[in-house]
Amino acid sequence: MRVILPDSSELELPDGATGLDAARAIGPKLAEQAVLVRANGSVRDLRLPLEDGEEIQILTTRDREDPDALWVLRHSAAHLLAEAARRLYPGTKVAIGPPIENGFYYDFEFPEPVGEEALELLEEEIRREIAEGRSWERWETSRDEARRYFVEEGEPYKAELVDTAEGDISFYRQGDFVDLCRGPHLVNAEPIKAIKLLSLAGAYWRGDEARPQLTRVYGTAFFDPEDLEGYLRRIEEARRRDHRRLGKELGLFDFSELAPGMPFWHPRGMVIWNVLEDLRRRENARRGYEEVRTPQLYDSDLWRTSGHWDKFREHMFQLEIEGRDYGLKPMNCPGHCLLYSLAPHSYRELPLRIAEAGNLHRNELSGVLHGLLRVRHFVQDDAHIFCTNEQIQDELLACLDYAYYLYDLFELDIRVELSLRPDNRLGTDQDWDFAEGELVKALATTGLDYTPSEGEGSFYGPKIDLHMSDSLGRSWQLGTVQLDLQMPKRFGLGYQGDDNAEHTPAMIHRALLGSLERFVGVYVEHTGGDLPLVLAPEQVRILPVADSHLADAESLADRLRAEGLRARVDEREETLGKRIRDAELEKVPYVVVWGDRESLDSVSVRRRGGDQSVTSADALAEELRAAARL
RNA sequence: GCCGGAGUAGCUCAGCUGGUAGAGCAACGGAUUUGUAAUCCGUAGGUCGUGGGUUCGAGUCCCGCCUCCGGCUCCA
């Protein structure tokens, strides 16, 4: 048979030849360094046969940044970890250990709980294994035999995995450790030049809260120690962008033990908040939304009607007053339905778009709270659109257009997810078919790339979710556009149609920035605290060189403030160098130094980061005014 | 909520096997009047997260709780 090499040349091989055979045929050195073979674009274990006519590419240890090569390296590293765990802690049961982005993990059930000291011990053991030499052997077996093997070995998790594994059952062995595994794996452990175990965490077996919690060991591995160092350095840099740290340093927001998960906004943070609120109000008005205001607390009957009492109660703060049960609102929608129901409606009013940045409380599990990104008290730039079925498409598209208007303003990189029906839901399958179909159609019209996500929808409807990543690459949902046919029905909402009959409206729930808290959190990380001029709490700081310049500095500040800019004079008796340093650390975008050399025609301006220039007060005001516009 | 870790001055952190709690920055006072990332001197500041226990003696050892951090589950 013949295979095609990357340079388009053909290589003649005996039938049944493997990737490794191909590498050997090309050169011994290549075979030595080979990590995996990419055949017709997909990864394949070097030990597996090639097919006639396939285009192949042999990846080697020199492809040290190739995601597939790293994937294989880390997968093999995970197996070494499992071998080490079983040797160091006899009686350990192994569960599952895949490579992940930036590393790998392996889940174990240790006979005794282990603490962090285990990381070092395990790491040492793995190094010993690598020094000793390990190579992987691969073979296939029947499902029954695989199951029998693991039952005999006392590995219940593996035995269970055999039953759900897809395709042929293959085993890999290195040292005395045999694992059920699809592969591919390295030929031997030689290429693993850097390995580090990073952390220990609990993880439920198969991600199911009701099943045993295993101990997950996270680690990472590289072809080159330098790459590991680089990775650790990047993590360290990301830590400096952490919004919790920056929020405190820049005096934006805070937290107290006395209100877990509920942010406090300092004046400087409130400036950011208000700019976002102004933007929301302006655009809502421009796009045909009307603002409303609804209560914070409702009788449990409202939550029964909406379905929240059934499907969302564990996330709600509840209280009892004079024998009546109340719930603090976790969402605005039921209140908006109630508001809608308080007056009669005609088809002529639709689509009716009502917006409210209401205060929401959700009783999130204590372990999930995370700075501003996951809180118990938050505010969304929320709105609900009541419309006819015929209007759904236009409204969905308008929502997405609005969303991307905002994301483009802030230059955000957004990932789109289509969250489909969950198990825990209201309504008929026909409703869900229709609602999901409408969202798919709207997405198709926009041409946005998206990933469908089974079971992630809300209990009342499917959603288009708009995600962004934080400094450590963790994904957070910002915006969401949801189509709901359930609540209008449950609330008995109606409108009088042009046929004089009563109809039920459809309802679109949408938040675009999402929770303002979360938005500020990810945005601070996105910018590393270097907020654009529009959002900067303090836009210009003026530094008088000596006391004698104070009056002039103040009048320049007044001049800029009259233009609507946020300007301040730093009148502390510190050296100029110190005051410049402080302005930089506080990330003030513009610093003006005012001394004997300055006049309204020649103002000395320093931009964040150190660029200096001289301009006139008028030109400066104009530049700032233009840049501070949204 | 669960698993692992942590909590010492406003912030960042030191405090070995139990023996009277420390530094830098910030704050405050004084001197300095400064030209593009830290002027100098001084002062003050802590029920060591919290409740209990062991001990002659606990920041340090043990137990409960709270909060935070990294994960899991969950989610805007």
Image (cartoon, grey):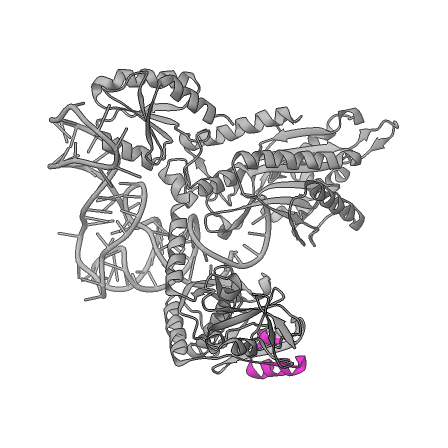
Q: Is residue A410 magenta?
A: no
Q: Note whether residue A408 is visible.
A: yes
Q: Quadrant of the N terminus of chain A?
A: bottom right
With respect to residue A473, does A349 lie above or below? Answer: above
Q: Residue at x 68, y 40 (%)?
A: A446
**What is the chief secondary structure element of the magenta stretch?**
helix
In the visual, does A588 lie left or right of A91? left
With respect to residue A60, does B40 lie above or below? Answer: above
With respect to residue A147, does B13 lie above or below? Answer: above
Q: Nearer the viewer, residue A403 or A1?
A: A1
Q: Nearer the viewer, residue A80 or A597?
A: A597
In the visual, does A340 lie left or right of A78? right
In the visual, does A187 lie left or right of A296? left
Tell me where residue A304 sits by quadrant: top right
Q: Residue at x 63, y 75 (%)?
A: A50
Q: Note whether residue A359 is visible.
A: no
The residue lying furthest to the front in this view is A9
Q: Residue at x 43, y 20 (%)?
A: A622
In the visual, does A404 lie left or right of B11? right
Percent from the top left, x then y, of residue A56? 59, 69
Percent from the top left, x then y, of residue A577? 23, 32
Q: Which residues are magenta?
A: A139-159
Tell me where residue A441 sits by quadrant: top right
Q: Is residue A143 magenta?
A: yes
